[in-house]
Image (spheres, grey):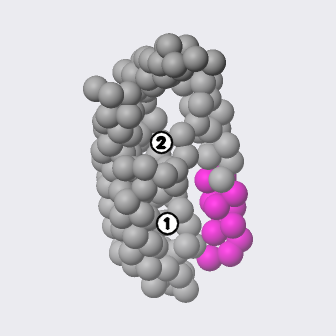
Amino acid sequence: MDRQEAREALGAMQGATTKFGETFDCPPWRHAVFGAVMASLVFSVSLPQPWQVAVYVLTMASLVIIVRSDRRRNGVFVNGWRRGRTLPFTILVMLFMLGMVALSVSGRHAPFPPLRAMIAALAAFACGTAMSVVWQRIYRAELSKSAGL
């Protein structure tokens, strides 16, 4: 491969990255589903056995559905733990969610999930949904920048 071919190949790759960044737009329901997954994980730790395991299994099954849906819609599933500008934000999201889990788990032995577990789950849903939108914006900006825009 000579220099001209290499430049053309690089240009084609940058064009594909730009096009993918322009089309990578999750619908609002996808962000809400992410928030719901986070909320169910947070809430599940406050439940007694076997309910905790049942909710956890259902949540993990929903993640499989999300991955398949993303692959069908976008052709790929983009992992939040990927290297790049999104990683620090992903870590921040997980630290927040761990705080919500700690709040929720503190009522694990109550006969019914305590109010703080429900509040933690609602906060996880709202913040998870909003954080999904922000994560997408960071990712799209990163794609645009890597494509030389």
Inspect the image, locate mark 2, and give the three-letter code of the amino acid beneath it.
Answer: Val
Q: Which residue is mark 2?
A: 33
Confirm whether residue 16 shows in the render.
Answer: no
SS category of the residue bearing label 2 = helix
Q: Is 78 part of what is drawn in magenta? A: no
Query: Of label 1 and label 2, which has the lower sequence position?
Result: 2
Asked if residue 46 lies left or right of residue 24, the reply is: right
Residue under circle 1?
Answer: 43
> Residue at image x 44%, y 72%?
98
The x, y position of residue 11, in whole percent, is 45, 18
Q: Judging from the image, what secondary structure is the residue with disc 1 in?
A: helix
As drawn, the residue found furthest toward the front would be 2
Rendered residue at 45%/84% (across/down): 106
Asked if one can make out residue 8 in the rendered structure from this viewpoint, the answer is: yes
Occupied quadrant, residue 96: bottom left
Identify the amino acid type marked 1: Phe
Residue, x 32% and y 42% (percent of image)?
A: 138
**For residue 51: magenta?**
yes
User: Horizontal and vertical percent for residue 124?
Assistant: 38, 60
- 2 with respect to 30 (left or right): right
Main secondary-structure element of the magenta-colored stretch: helix
Camera-side residue: 106 or 128? Answer: 128
The residue at 50%/13% (across/down) is 4
16, 93: nearer the viewer: 16
Picture quadrant where residue 88 is located? bottom left
Q: Which mark is residue 147?
A: none
Q: What's the magenta region? A: 48-59
| Mark 1 or 2, closer to the camera | 2
Q: Where is the C terminus found, in terms of image quarters? A: top left
